[in-house]
Image (cartoon, rainbow, N blue to C red):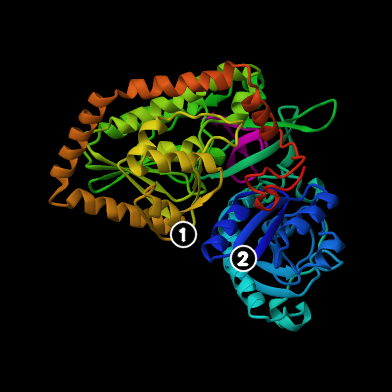
Amino acid sequence: MKILFLTHAFNGLAQRLFIELRELGHEVAIELDVNDALTAQALALAKPDLVIAPFLKRAIPEAVWSAVPCLVVHPGVPGDRGPSALDWAILEGEREWGVTVLQAVGEMDAGPVWAHRAFPMRLAPKSSLYRREVTEAAVTAVTEAVKAFARGEKPVQVADLGAEARGRARPLVRQADRAIDWAADDTLTVLRKIHSADGFPGLRDEILGRPVRLFGAHAEGTLRGPVPGGVIATRHGGILRATRDGAVWISHLQAIAPESGDPTLKLPATEVLGDALAGVAEIAYAVDAPPHGDTWRELRYEEHGDVGVLHFAFHNGAMSPSQCRRLLAALQVAKCRPTKVLVLAGGEDFWSNGIHLNAIEATGRPADASWESINAIDDVAREVITMTDRLTVSALAGNAGAGGVFLALAADRVWLNRGVVLNPHYKGMGNLYGSEYWTYLLPRRVGEKRAREITARRLPMGSHEAVQLGLADARFGHDPHAFLAAAVKRAQAMAEDPRYADTLFAKRRQRLVDETAKPLDKYREEELERMKLNFYGFDPSYHVARYHFVHKLPKARTPYYLASHRAGAPG
């Protein structure tokens, strides 16, 4: 069928559905929900059999849903209505939640149901639940709904679903609904409140006299503080705050501008609070320290037999220069261990999305900060490429984009969780050229011609296509925990393979051959010469695109690489 996506943004859920439906043979075009006139124009150009709305912030115009069947993906159980479905589910401690695919009608979220899927709730940030449980349930439910529509079936009224329709209409969650009372709320309540606002809009609070919004809450199992709400310690840019019965780490904050009341850039908490933290202790945690109760740390190294596993769970997959330096140091620790295989595990939500654009924007000197950032991540890539004393595996349990994809290719093997979405391109960020030795790493896997095609097309790629193209070596599993457990078993099998020594020798020999043909330093020099033009040249496209991205400015139109229905259309 011809399907038109009408979406507020081409986010992770929309990208995953785009991939899945295209793999089923459907023709899928994307239109960002900018205004009614452009939506009507898109409908006329695309002539879809079906409109799917994976992520909207307003109702679909009647002129659209009355002309073409429109399926809305709602992150709530049948009968649930309102814009804060997942927020309320987290706040109220729901043990099971779901996704409902319903048909758009005049009243928002009130249409008949095409499909729905339930999932068990984790104690986790809203953004994490949305990327994992909500996305997986949505893929299943949307696929079922599209197949039912193609068969000519009809949706079911909510009233006919009986006990399954346990949802109800609820209003937008206000900041007052989730405000923390640090003296009265226990740790679980604090976590739920912060989790319910994670991603957007953030939970409004005050720290050391400064109005902020809180993101990235993690439980602390050991440390305590005397005054609930007080800052006990810092670590890796995060702060530890005391609760009535424990403590929680908060990794990121948004300062509230005093003149407008608007939030500013989301940044590591210590950067936002700055001098106000004078006298607060930084509590280090060695990357290879054994776990001692629940705590939060971005980097963690562990061993399983002959396999070392390095976890680096950076917030939203973004890597600042300081994070890259910590990761580089962790790689050097791992290199000193007597293991045969090193698994680079990234984080469960994201493996890596490359350089940290918010951190660059916040410096006020974006060209210099961009240059520092790309060199820092290049250092990490080089460390992995030149690690010839063992085999290396990039095991992607979560998504990766831009430089993060090419950083993964620095390893000898690339394994993907089946639900992973890759964005192996830079061009969407103002025609950024990119580095991370991609001009060496990508062609050696897929060839020069295919490398050019992959980086030019600007569209997301699923794990199936990545393996087909040779970008990755295997795809397996669904759940991040099960995927990583399976990856460690596969890595141990590599270590125990009687051909291990021959494989390692072949790796060393190939690295020498490649270095003789063209040194890594030359690849890096050529890439950085192109990036210098992006950062310091006359064309400001990268700086404009980065500014729009970090400040979340709405688009005035849908980019043509997404809106295939607009190709060749006048205007």
Residue 274 sits above or below residue 554 on the image = above
| Amino acid type, label 2 | Arg
> Residue 284: percent from the left, percent from the top?
45, 29
Q: Can see residue 169? A: no
Quarter of the picture holding the N terminus:
bottom right
The circle on residue 479 is 1
Q: Observer-nearest residue: 557 or 545?
A: 557
Residue that carries the numbered disc 2 in the rendered image: 95
> Residue 107: percent from the left, percent from the top?
86, 66
Q: Earlier in the sequence, mark 1 or mark 2?
A: 2
Q: Can see residue 225? A: yes
Residue 422 sits above or below residue 98 on the image = above
Q: Disc 1 on helix, strand or loop? A: loop
Q: Quadrant of residue 512?
A: top left
| Amino acid type, label 1 | Asp
The nearer-to-camera label among 1 and 2 is 1
> Residue 518: percent from the left, percent from the top?
29, 24
Highlighted magenta segment, given as a residue range = 226-253
Residue 511 sits above or below residue 309 on the image = above
Q: Quadrant of residue 102?
A: bottom right
| Residue 251 is a magenta residue | yes
Neighbours of disc 1 within 10 Å: few (<14), some (14-19), many (20+):
some
Q: Quadrant of residue 262?
A: top right
Neighbours of disc 2 within 10 Å: few (<14), some (14-19), many (20+):
few
> Residue 206: percent from the left, percent from the top?
74, 33
Q: CA distance from mark 1 to mark 2?
A: 18 Å
Q: Disc 2 on helix, strand or loop? A: loop
In this picture, residue 223 sits left or right of residue 203: left
Assess whether mark 2 and mark 1 are in contact (beta carbons under 8 angstroms). no
- Name the residue at 48% across, 46% down: 294
